[in-house]
Amino acid sequence: MSEADTSFVPQLDARQRAMLAEMGVRVWAPRPVAATAPAQNETAKAAVAAPAPVVARAAPVAPPASAAPARAVAPAAPTVAAPVADVAQVPRIAGVELMDWATLRDTVAGCTACGLCQGRKNTVFGVGDQQADWMIVGEAPGENEDRLGEPFVGAAGQLLDNMLRAVGRSRSGQGAQGSYIANVIKCRPPANRNPQPDEVARCEPYLARQVALVQPKVIVAMGRFAVQSLLKTNEPIGRLRGKVHRYEGVPVIVSYHPAYLLRTPGDKAKAWADLCLAMDTLENA
């Protein structure tokens, strides 16, 4: 990453810029407020594209020469119903939809709705600004999350923190600098196995209530189970990226889980494009 890419963000020190450079991203900055002719806007946006590892604000894959570049946010895509557990047969805790933050947290801490409660050290409720306009939804706790009771810690959590910092946000920030982070599943599955459909179904009401309490303006769903839970689809992430979906009226941006990005660093550029789409969606909300 060159100095020209980061000179407009003096709050980042050299170490932070180096971490972002390792991700192959540049720091997001709001679009200037000065009015520009539509044709000039399109020309400027097309000129932003730069060679790797610096990833432009536009889509990470260059369009064909015959196609005109576009930055417009794609319309909501229809979702496909995914095979899930028969919700009618899954016992639910009564009154979740009416709980306040304190009651919801206490209920999650004492939840025994599925067998995951038997092996947990801590429930992993959520962290961040409870009135944030930006919400991150992950999948399920791992060993570190179970030990500390906080979502996205360890190496994956550090990468997520770097990604949030690149768009001017953090898990501890407030207002325009804040975010709220939660998982679909609140207890660690044994040996970090995939959660079962009935486990997801029992935990979903907690996440639904968190979304209702936060009232975010955009949700970034990270990972297959977060996407399936929110969108009720079994479509692969690759087919859902780059579009704005909806959950209870809230725009949802689909992206990869940080743990996957650690295993597949070549897709970090795609994840950065997803964050840019989330920021664009938030600006246009």
Image (spheres, grey):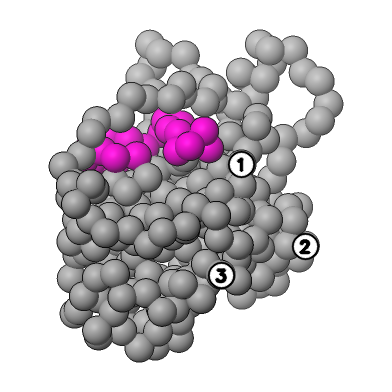
Residue 149 quadrant: bottom left
In this rendering, position of residue 179 left or right of residue 153: right
Label 3 sits on what residue type?
Thr
Element type where label 1 sits in the image: loop
**On-image quarter of the N terminus:** bottom right
Compare residues 273 and 2 and report the one nearer the observer.
273
Q: Where does label 1 land, which residue? A: 217
Compare residues 174 and 198 and report the one nearer the observer.
198
Checking the image for residue 103, the label placed there is 3
Q: Residues within 10 Å of mark 2 (few under 14, many from 20)?
A: few
Compare residues 71 and 94 and report the one nearer the observer.
94
In this rendering, position of residue 237 left or right of residue 153: left
Residue 12 is one of the magenta-drawn residues: no
Q: Residues within 10 Å of mark 1 (few under 14, many from 20)?
A: some
Checking the image for residue 66, the label placed there is none
Q: Where does label 2 land, which residue? A: 10
Residue 263 image position (x, y, % from top left):
27, 65
Q: Residues within 10 Å of mark 3 (few under 14, many from 20)?
A: few
Residue 252 image position (x, y, % from top left):
47, 40
Label 1 sits on what residue type?
Lys
Residue at 66% over, 70% down: 172
Element type where label 3 sits in the image: helix
**On-image quarter of the C terminus:** top right
Residue at 47% over, 58% down: 96
Span highlighted in magenta in the image: 231-251
Residue 227's place in the image compared with 277, above or below, is below
**What's the CA distance linking mark 1 and mark 3?**
24 Å
**What's the CA distance linking mark 2 and mark 3?**
41 Å
* Tally of numbered discs: 3
